[in-house]
Image: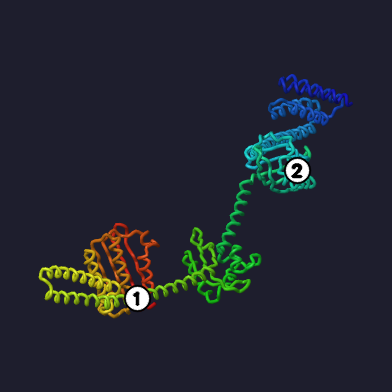
Amino acid sequence: METEAKKFRDIFRAGLKTYLSDKNEASLTDAYELGRQALKDGFSELAIIEMYHVVLKDILRDRNGGNDCEILERSSVYLVECLAPFEVKLRSYQDLIEDLNKKNEQLKEEIQNRKEVDKELQRSKDHFQSLIEHAQDVITVLDGKGIIRYTSPSIRRILGYGKSELLGRDTFQYLHPRDLDRVKNIFDELLAEPDRIRSEEFRFKHRDGYWVFLESIAKHVSDEDGTRIIVNSRDVTERKRAIKQLRENEAQLSEAQRIAKVGSWEWRPGEEDGLSWSDEMCRIYGIDPTSFNHTYETFLEHVHPEDRDRIEREVTRALELKQPFAFEHRIIRGSDGEERKLLGRGQVITDGKGQVVRLIGTGQDITEQKEREQKLREYSNRLRRLSARIERAREEERTRIAREVHDELGQMLTVLKMDISMLSGELKKKIDPEIMDFLERETQNILKRINTIISSVQRITAELRPEVLDDLGLKDAIEWQAQEFAERSGLRVNFNSNISNPNMLDEEQSTIIFRIFQETLTNIIRHAQASKVDIRLDIEDECLVLVVRDNGIGITEEQREASASLGLIGMRERTQLLGGTVRIEGKENEQTKVMLQIPLDKRD
């Protein structure tokens, strides 16, 4: 029976192929006769239909292109002719035909679905391949022994190797010696646990010989080809360098903060634990960084109680105005309770809407600086008192010398002048007139020289200590000195004053102001190249104001600040003795003005 079935199937296959190929109606007649013979041989309709499906699947599988739907339609026609002799079973036959049509439709649908699935699989494959081909990271496939079986094209950009250059090679030979054991251990763990994922950083040798830091994620995948380790690697060399540089910068910043005693802080108002301090800031406050409570209240707790309200007001004002701020305050260290002085500076950071996001700033320990400033002030005060004492001693010595020169030398010269005059009168009575004429001429010359000496003595004594300063006061002394200056220099000098009380200053104050005025006139003669000088001595806002202005070549910034200018230094030192200020204004090639201002209620 099986032999007959096989023979029938072969005849059926040949007849169907012939009909499908030549589309001849005679083939349908052969199909009908084949059906009659099958009916005689005892084949059932179902057997013929099953045989039909087997033959049709073989034909569809072996075909070289063509329209599947058309093949199904023509095959159905051939089958119908083959089953035509079975008229006695017409109704069953019709049911079988309907079932056959349904199965044909299902088969068509399956074929169409398979085509769509194949297309989708191909699209997915193309998409996945494109992702791999254009991936920024290197994708590598290793077998169970660590042999490289695949590398993505990005390996050339990151590691310098061609796409196929490393295929078949042991990946471990390219690892840095210090990373080798660690990576091998991870590889063994992945092999032992399928589907496990591990990430790690290590160094891989570049084709040019240097090391590249890779951050890799690896997964164990098993398929029909065996064990595979898929590794996705990213070049993190620049990131590692940046992190290293950042750590070095942080270390340098920490060391710089330690040396400068400057700590940094950041505060995010409204956030819990929103305050952060640098290590140096914690050290300044005597707080262990590991146990620091990151709150604004922690900061206030360490502020000196007497400064706390003021600091809160400063911070509140900065938040309201959104402006930088700076303030000095005292703190109580947490570790030893020592009182220290700090200079705090801060900046308010806002977002695009003007809302406060955070505050950043620094805190500098200025305790030693303040102590040095205090000592410097004390030394400065001592020097100022010493300078005042020296100045008073100098003026006293000038006064003593002036009086002695005036009284003794002046009197002696006057007596000498009188003696010579008397001698000349006596000689006229006893000496020949011709000789007397000669003596008279010499006597007059001697008297002239004595008068010159007397004038010099008077000038010297006036310069040492002008009598007008003691007798008439500062206003008249300055006016007299201005006239003397005009006569000696030939410059036009104008003097104005609104002072009516000549005794408003004591002797020491008047002397210091007068000496400053003399130094100002000396500088005009030496440097100004002026032709006119205006002098004003007035009372303004309970201050004595002396202004000396010339129309000379002016003064440069360097000349005003020159440390070697002893005259200007002396003027400033004398002014400080009276608690006043002296300003020198002017520019190069413009006039110069010296303005002295002395509070009338100040005494050193």
User: Which residue type carries mark 1?
Assistant: Glu
Q: Position of residue 399 (x, y in %)?
A: 31, 76
Q: Is residue 251 left or right of residue 442?
A: right
Any part of residue 266 in sight: no
Report whether 99 appears left or right of 553. Answer: right
Residue found 38% across the figure and 66% down from its top: 569
**Which image quadrant for residue 546?**
bottom left
Q: Nearer the viewer, residue 341 or 552?
A: 552
Residue 409 on image: x %, y %: 27, 75
Which residue is tagged 2?
221
Q: Earlier in the sequence, mark 1 or mark 2?
A: 2
Badge 2 crowding class, 10 Å Cα cut-off, few under 14, some 14 to 19, many 20 or more, is: some
As helix, strand or loop, the secondary structure at mark 1 comes to helix
From this view, report whether residue 191 is shown above or below residue 555. above
Q: Which residue occupies 74% across, 42% down?
A: 229
**Quarter of the rendering containing residue 260:** bottom right
Identify the residue at horizontal 52%, vertical 74% (top origin).
307
Residue under label 1: 397
Q: Secondary structure at mark 2?
A: strand
- The residue lying at 33 percent from left, 72 percent from top is 597
